[in-house]
Image (cartoon, helix red, strand yellow):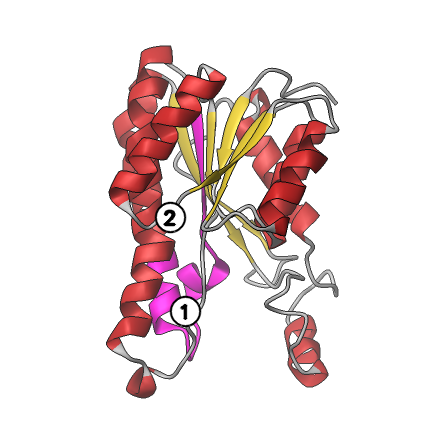
């Protein structure tokens, strides 16, 4: 359980959902966790205390991942507070679903800024400390929608596809410095965003999944553990699909 002992990880969008479970899982395995949210609330402060109960260093930072300068300043402060950063998990993301003919420009821009630009912002911020240390693992949260598209999610799909292209490019740029960059593409995962879906919609998704169950945030967190640890030391530029076989 100590495979990540002493490793410092940054997780964006960790106040709830998949990000929160990733943070808890990493702390359980001994990692020190710096995590961000857009506002200090009970979710953010409560998670900080939960993580510290594992005996690791944990700190919450209020930061807008879609804002370039805020991201640079936050990472600089994290490096100052923790001493180094070995792992970055770009998890922050939102949805603004609608058919293209009804989609507003704001719906498009919000998705691109929060889902895609944030990945650029944080990755650019950690490059120098990782290059100096000559090691690092960057994990970007994409989606099966980014590889296959989905009606009513043109903006979301475009942002998640962009993350994949970004991931592969960064892997090629930074591989010689022993910095790896991979993406995870979750499928149908049980989160706050999916729990209110009508049962017929859930049944339709399940019919497409060979494992005949929805995924859990823990399934995604375990994939992050693998890509963050030395178990994946020869893996970079890849997209790890966590979807129960849905996209076979």
Q: What label does residue 149 carry, if any?
A: 1
**Among the two numbered marks 1 and 2 on one chain, the one whose residue lies closer to the N terminus:** 2
Identify the residue at image location x=30%, y=57%. Answer: 113
Image spot of residue 79 (x, y percent): 41, 21
Residues shaded magenta: 137-162
Rendered view: 240 above or below 158: above
Identify the residue at image location x=61%, y=38%. Answer: 23
The C terminus, quarter of image: bottom right
* Crowd around label 1: few <14 · some 14–19 · many ≥20 (10 Å): some
Image spot of residue 165 (x, y percent): 30, 48
Residue 192 occupies which quadrant of the picture? bottom right
Left or right of 122: which side holds 4?
Answer: right
* Magenta residue check for 143: yes
Left or right of 179: which side holds 213?
Answer: right
Relative to the observer, which residue lies in front, 58 or 140? Answer: 58
Q: Distance between the residues labelled 1 and 2?
A: 27 Å
Rendered view: 190 above or below 49: below
Left or right of 21: which side holds 67?
Answer: left
Query: Is residue 42 something one can see in this rendering?
Result: yes
Left or right of 236: which side holds 73?
Answer: left
The N terminus, quarter of image: top right
Residue 102 occupies which quadrant of the picture? bottom left
Question: Looking at this rendering, what residue extends furthest in the bottom direction?
Answer: 101
Relative to the observer, which residue lies in front, 160 or 72? Answer: 72
Q: What label does residue 64 carry, if any?
A: 2
Relative to the observer, which residue lies in front, 106 or 77? Answer: 77
């Amino acid at each position: 359980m100590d495979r990540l002992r002493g490793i410092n990880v940054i997780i964006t969008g960790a106040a709830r959902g998949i990000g929160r479970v990733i943070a808890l899982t990493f702390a359980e395995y001994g990692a020190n966790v710096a995590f961000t949210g857009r506002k200090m609330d009970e979710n953010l402060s409560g998670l900080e205390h939960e993580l510290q109960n594992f005996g690791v260093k944990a700190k919450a930072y209020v930061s807008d991942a879609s804002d370039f300068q805020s991201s640079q300043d936050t990472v600089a402060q994290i490096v100052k507070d923790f001493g180094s950063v070995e792992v970055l998990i770009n998890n922050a993301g939102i949805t603004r679903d609608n058919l293209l003919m009804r989609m507003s420009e704001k719906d498009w821009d919000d998705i691109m800024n929060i889902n895609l630009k944030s990945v650029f912002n944080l990755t650019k911020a950690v490059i120098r400390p990782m290059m100096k240390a000559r090691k690092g693992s960057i994990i970007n949260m994409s989606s099966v929608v980014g590889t296959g598209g989905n009606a009513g999610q043109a903006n979301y799909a475009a942002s998640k596809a962009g993350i994949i292209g970004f991931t592969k490019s960064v892997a090629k740029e930074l591989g010689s410095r022993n910095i790896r960059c991979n993406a995870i593409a979750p499928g149908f995962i049980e989160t706050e965003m999916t729990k209110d879906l009508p049962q017929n919609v859930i049944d339709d998704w399940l019919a497409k999944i060979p494992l005949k169950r929805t995924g859990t945030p823990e399934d995604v967190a375990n994939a992050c553990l693998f890509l963050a640890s030395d178990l994946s030391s020869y893996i970079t530029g890849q997209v790890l699909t966590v979807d129960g076989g849905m996209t076979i």
